[in-house]
Amino acid sequence: MSFEKPQPSSEIPSIKRLEGEAGEKDWTYKKLQKAVKYVIEKFWGDKFKVEGKENVPKSGSAIIACNHSSHLDPEFLIAAINRPIHFIGLQDKEFNPLYVKIFYKLAGVIGVSRNPLKEGGRDFVKKLQEVVKSGELIGVFPEGILEEKKDKSEIVEFKPGVFSIAKKYGLDVVPVRMSGTDKVRPHSQPRLLQKINIEPVEVKIGEILRQEGIKAPEDVRQAIIALGQKKSVDKTPEK
């Protein structure tokens, strides 16, 4: 699968989340974000900490790269970062239950199959280009499929996708370290029956990694690991 660097254009609108107009897309995401924030604030309160929100660019497209420990990671990122995020997520009929498909629609997830070279590759590239051209954020979990990780709290080797996208589209990367979500939603039970625990969750947003300074996926991985070693500052997310 090849990527073409998009040319600037004032005529290309933002990607549509519910196949409506751009205004409807913004309204849909804001409603989703408001609901997610409400639930997290109500049940987690001060147990949810966010640090480094000033490191998220106020405008323009960039990659939000975060470690992956739980199926609830996207929801906590939505609550931590005010700007809309288009996550890249696995689009698999057998893997994704109905509620995941609904979330994908509402959040504007860019679906990718297990084998994008054979299935839906062109559609994935098209949607990715639309997001970049519209100057929006792209959310990725470079460790790949969560079920393939034996230790959910470990940060394993990154897939090359985040590196390839950053290089092809000239995008900077914002490293994010999330901790605690593996305890919020453990994987000892079947997916639909997984218990939700109100455990502390911390999101640390690091300084922007400029595209020209990223030589390999490992550079992003090490930046995220370093965030976990940084002393935390007691902060709660803005309401």
Image (cartoon, rainbow, N blue to C red):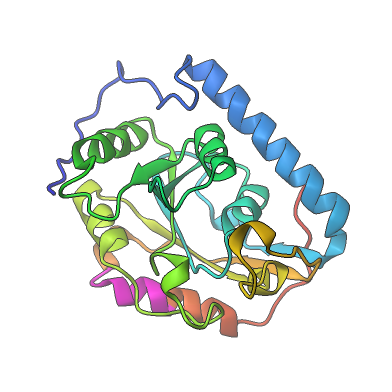
Residue 223 locus on image (x, y percent): 44, 75
Identify the residue shown where x is 70% and y is 77%: 232
| Residue 54 against residue 18 in the figure, above or below | below
Residue 231 picture quarter: bottom right
Q: Is residue 61 left or right of residue 5?
A: right
| Residue 166 against residue 13 in the figure, above or below | below
- Magenta stretch, main secondary structure class: helix
Residue 87 locus on image (x, y percent): 45, 47
Q: Is residue 34 left or right of residue 3?
A: right
Q: Which residues are magenta?
A: 214-222
Residue 131 locus on image (x, y percent): 36, 35
**Res. 151 visible in picture:** yes
Identify the residue shown where x is 20% and y is 35%: 6
Please identify the quadrant where the C terminus is shown: top right
Q: Nearer the viewer, residue 154 or 7?
A: 154
Identify the residue shown where x is 39% and y is 41%: 110
Q: Nearer the viewer, residue 226 or 98?
A: 98
Does the magenta segment cover residue 170? no
| Residue 26 against residue 61 in the figure, above or below | above
Q: Nearer the viewer, residue 127 or 237?
A: 127
Residue 177 locus on image (x, y percent): 55, 70
**Res. 72 visible in picture:** no
